[in-house]
Amino acid sequence: MKLGLALSGGAAYGYAHLGVLRVLEKYGIKPDIITGTSVGSLVGGGIASGFTAEEFIKLALDLKWTDIASLTIPKEGLVDLEKLEQYINKHFKVKKIQDTKIKFAAVVTDLVTAKGKIIKEGPIAPAIRASCSIPGIFTPAVISGNIYVDGGVIDNLPVEAAREMGADFVIAVDVLAGNRTDITAHRDVFNLLWRSWQVAILNMEKYKEGRDGAADFIITPEILGVGPFDIHKKEDLINFGERSAEKLAPELIKILNEKGSFMGI
């Protein structure tokens, strides 16, 4: 039996993923497969490459926007993510997806074919950069002549991708659906674009509910009063994720034990 972990997109809300991962690690819940969309691919790729949750949290707490992004003259996007590739190549423990310690894939959207794509091999940095490229905000990624943008355009919660990779039981972490931030207090171009993007994704996800691709267990951290680009509130976001996961941990452990215990106890 293979345990899959599907991590959603959600910009700075991705720090909540780290809080959830800290709790899963604490209880010995170790995925065999990780799939990620957007920031979920960044967090998932880091963990899959060999970081423990605590090691990755330590690295992430030092992260600044200037480490991974730079403003650009608006043409393909407001912000260039080329520095994100450099950051990944510098800090991650592997350079290729097929070398990760945990089986990993990043979900992207191919603008040429108008379809989603699960990147399971090749250089890890450009794959994650492509998955993180929110249209209109971040510049797209060009890989082998194809133009890729954020996987959330097609699939913001990559549960089906985890099943395609062999997962029998999928834990999904959706850091987008539980956000409760007042858009009227954040009316700059970045947040307005983001909110429009969020509304589209949440409505798209409603149509997926009840399908075979639905997660076996879902954790939706409640995020209050933090904007999607408030990277300076990273500790608050980690705590939101940790609290939500701790609350659900007993139920999750019970289910896993009933299914034969993926944890080996």
Image (cartoon, rainbow, N blue to C red):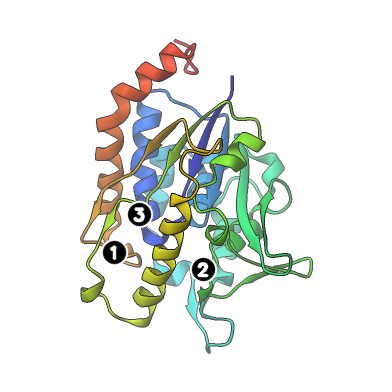
The percent coordinates of residue 193 (x first, y second) are 41, 75
Which numbered disc flags the more N-terminal residue, 3 or 1? Answer: 3
Instruction: Name the element at disc 1.
Output: helix
Of labels 2 and 3, the one closer to you: 2
* Mark 3 crowdedness (10 Å alpha carbons): few <14, some 14-19, many ≥20: some
The amino acid marked with disc number 1 is His
| Image point (53%, 39%), residue name | 211
The percent coordinates of residue 131 (x first, y second) are 58, 59
| Image point (43%, 45%), residue name | 56
Kindly identify which residue carries mark 1.
Answer: 232
* Mark 2 crowdedness (10 Å alpha carbons): few <14, some 14-19, many ≥20: many
The reply to whether callout 2 and callout 3 are in contact (CB within 8 Å) is no
Instruction: Name the element at disc 3.
Output: helix
The percent coordinates of residue 82 (x first, y second) are 59, 71
Which numbered disc flags the more N-terminal residue, 2 or 3? Answer: 3
**Residue 252 lies in what quarter of the image?**
top left
Kindly identify which residue carries mark 3.
Answer: 61
Which numbered disc flags the more N-terminal residue, 2 or 1? Answer: 2
Residue 54, relative to residue 186: is it above or below? above
The amino acid marked with disc number 2 is Ile
The amino acid marked with disc number 3 is Leu
Q: Which mark is residue 134?
A: 2
How far apart are labels 2 and 3 at the CA level?
22 Å
| Image point (35%, 54%), residue name | 61
